[in-house]
Amino acid sequence: LADVDELTTIKRELNYRISLQSAKLLRLLKQKDRLVQKVQKNCDIVTACLQAVSQKRWVDTKLKFTLEPSLGQNGFQQWHDALKAVARLPTGIPKEWRRKVWLTLADQYLHSIAIDWDKTMRFTFNERSNPDDDSMGIQIVKDLHRTGCSSYCGQEAEQDRVVLKRVLLAYARWNKSVGYCQGFNILAALILEVMEGNEGDALKIMIYLIDKVLPDSYFVNNLRALSVDMAVFRDLLRMKLPELSQHLDTLQRAANRESGGGYEPPLTNVFTMQWFLTLFATCLPNHTVLKIWDSVFFEGSEIILRVALAIWAKLGEQIECCETADEFYSTMGKLTQEMLEDSLIDSNELMQTVYTMAQFPFPQLAELREKYTYNITPFPAAVKSTSFSGRLGRTRDSDEENDFDDEDSIANAIGCLGPLSGFLAPELQKYQKQMKGKSD
């Protein structure tokens, strides 16, 4: 046994170390309090700025900015309203916040539908193959090599492609009614980029985006909701940009006459469909696309229609100089490349147009969507490339005969997409062969 002197020495040493740790802990707590006060002060400044630039409505006086939502539904709603206001600022959501902001939105949605996330992860990322995995895997790999996958996967980034394939298969397992749709690789790649390669987080965002934010049936079965929005957009174009819409209709009618009985679809279709399917990820630079997605996550799917209107408004002056449909497609080929190279559309100007073109929600949008939901023939199953891949086909608005879509006419226009044409080319080539066979 240790003698009394040794025990006294040990006690003295322990008391000394405890006093050092206590002093250190006290300093850290004081430092934490100062940082909390500083953060709170900065949050109050952001709150004041948001209220200063707001429309001075009663609801705007309730804005209170916080970096994270407090507990409860009211706390989340307060955080949501403040971040939605931040997204509307010219600078938008800071890139340093984006990952956390998106995950907070996704986590809240998953919590609201009472999902056991650990169980979901085990099921969706199970290494054991399911019956549908082989066919989906083949289609996914084809799409990855044909269309690329954002800046997330370079030409030699094979491991990134493996991660991307795992996320796409995981979502297909999660939502079997949708499975895999061509174009998902582009969405998932950008999400993985923001999520810094985390597979589970990327799956959360995919679920939130496709299942919660976008309209029902946007990608499921015959793309009914997408075909509805295509028809709605043409009506909005007539309402907001009547001169451009009329000019495009004139070019379409002239092309119909010149074709000798053939049919030229609405000229905006091939471009708008591409934009909607990939949420603009293939036509605009990443920093602009991410601003758009921030807005989509907070404002909902009507942002997609607003952005499309803003883009056509920007391109209108050059398009109105076109005298034929062929000249239109040629001009759009050049403009599409300029948009992608960030030399045509300023992101701040674009988003300002998006937010100021009409009040929220967009007037008549709900009515138009309801109208076409029950008065449209969506893309038929006959034109599906596989049960899980993207679909293209004929869309018809029942009360507007001039809104028929013709696959062959779209196929003839696909060349103007330049580097983006690979996304839709395989399906369109099939349609060209089918139509050529009919004509022969």
Image: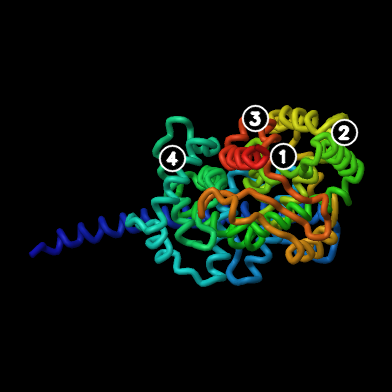
Kind of residue at badge 2: Glu
- Image disc number at residue 201: none
In this rendering, which labeled residue sits more in front, label 2 or label 1? 1
Q: Secondary structure at mark 1?
A: helix
Q: State the image coordinates of residue 301 (x, y, percent, origin top left).
A: 70, 56
Q: State the image coordinates of residue 205 (x, y, percent, origin top left).
A: 55, 55
Kind of residue at badge 4: Asp
Q: Is residue 275 visible?
A: no
Q: Which residue is mark 2?
A: 320
In this rendering, which labeled residue sits more in front, label 1 or label 3? 1
Q: Which residue is mark 4?
A: 160
Q: Secondary structure at mark 3?
A: helix
Kind of residue at badge 3: Gly
Q: Residues within 10 Å of mark 2 (few under 14, many from 20)?
A: some
Kind of residue at badge 1: Ser
- Image disc number at residue 418: 3
Give the mark, 2 or 1, whose residue is nearer the N terminus. 2
Q: Secondary structure at mark 4?
A: helix
Q: Which residue is mark 1?
A: 409
Give the mark, 4 or 1, whose residue is nearer the N terminus. 4
> Which residue occupies the foreground of this view, 233 or 259?
259
Q: Compared with residue 111, is residue 104 higher up or lower down, i.e. above or below? A: above
Give the mark, 3 or 2, whose residue is nearer the N terminus. 2
